[in-house]
Amino acid sequence: MHYRASMSPRIASIARETKETSIDVRVNLDGHGEYQVSTGIGFLDHMLEQLSRHSLIDITIAAKGDLHIDGHHTTEDTGIALGEAVAKALGDRKGITRYGDVLIPMDETLTRVALDISGRPYLVWKSGFTQPKLGELDTEMVKEFFAAFAGSAGITLHIETLYGVNNHHIAESCFKGLARALRTAVAIDPRKADAIPSTKGTLGGAPTTGNAGV
């Protein structure tokens, strides 16, 4: 596909520093699913590795946070920084497929993920857990990660677990679903590689984050 050779690499880096966390993120949207992830939260690392592998986005994350308190700030800020890096790498969104949706089965669990790289951040979350932790990760932070990512990436994101029992499978199917939907949505459509996929001629929106869920 010769159109790719004429386009700039879709690579971006973000350094996010607060009193609570220090996070460095680098992404390559046209990568091969290679990753180096270290957040200090083992289960979160595992999920982010799945996100990279199944999206084919190369992801490097080095995060240090106030884990002596809990994992809240590290998880949320990692989502923010990763979303910012993806948004930066997308640039003006010219040529992208824009939409992606997928059903992810994982043993007894089935999760549906649909997204629109719209510039209008919004999360609809219809999933949940029956235990408070997965490894060192508070399960309530899974939703917060996706909310943070969608908000800073400017993505409309819908996640719904249709059924499932095993909490690990539920979480992993959500991350793999995001990965596969992103893989489709960020891909360049060779028929419209020079056009922004919107009748408005731009993909943007309000900087605030909507949120709905059960």
Image (spheres, rainbow, N blue to C red):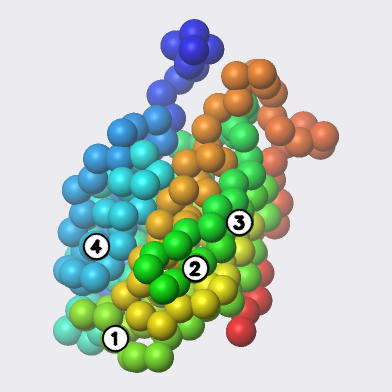
Residue 13 in the image: x percent, y percent?
A: 34, 41
Q: Which of label 2 and label 3 is nearer to you?
A: 2
Between disc 4 and disc 3, whose residue precedes?
Answer: 4
Q: SS at mark 3? A: strand
The answer to whether the residues at label 1 and label 2 have Cβ atoms under 8 Å apart is: no
In the image, 96: left or right of 28? Answer: right
State which quarter of the image contains the C terminus. bottom right
Q: Where is residue 111 in the image (x, y as percent from the top left)?
A: 51, 66
Looking at the image, residue 32 lies above or below residue 39: above
Q: How crowded is mark 4: few (under 14 residues within 10 Å), some or many (20 or more)?
A: some
**Residue on which the image places disc 3:** 114
Residue 77's place in the image compared with 36, above or below, is below
Tell me which amino acid carries mark 4.
Answer: His
- In the rendered structure, are the residues bearing label 1 and label 3 in contact, judged by CB atoms less than 8 Å apart? no
Which residue has dot 2 on it? 110
Kind of element beneath mark 2: strand
Instruction: Inspect the image, locate mark 2, and give the three-letter code of the amino acid beneath it.
Output: Leu
Tell me the quarter of the picture where residue 49 sits: bottom left
Q: Name the residue under label 1.
A: 133
Give the mark nearest the N terminus, 1 or 3: 3
Instruction: In this rendered view, identify the residue nearer to me: 85 or 95.
Output: 95
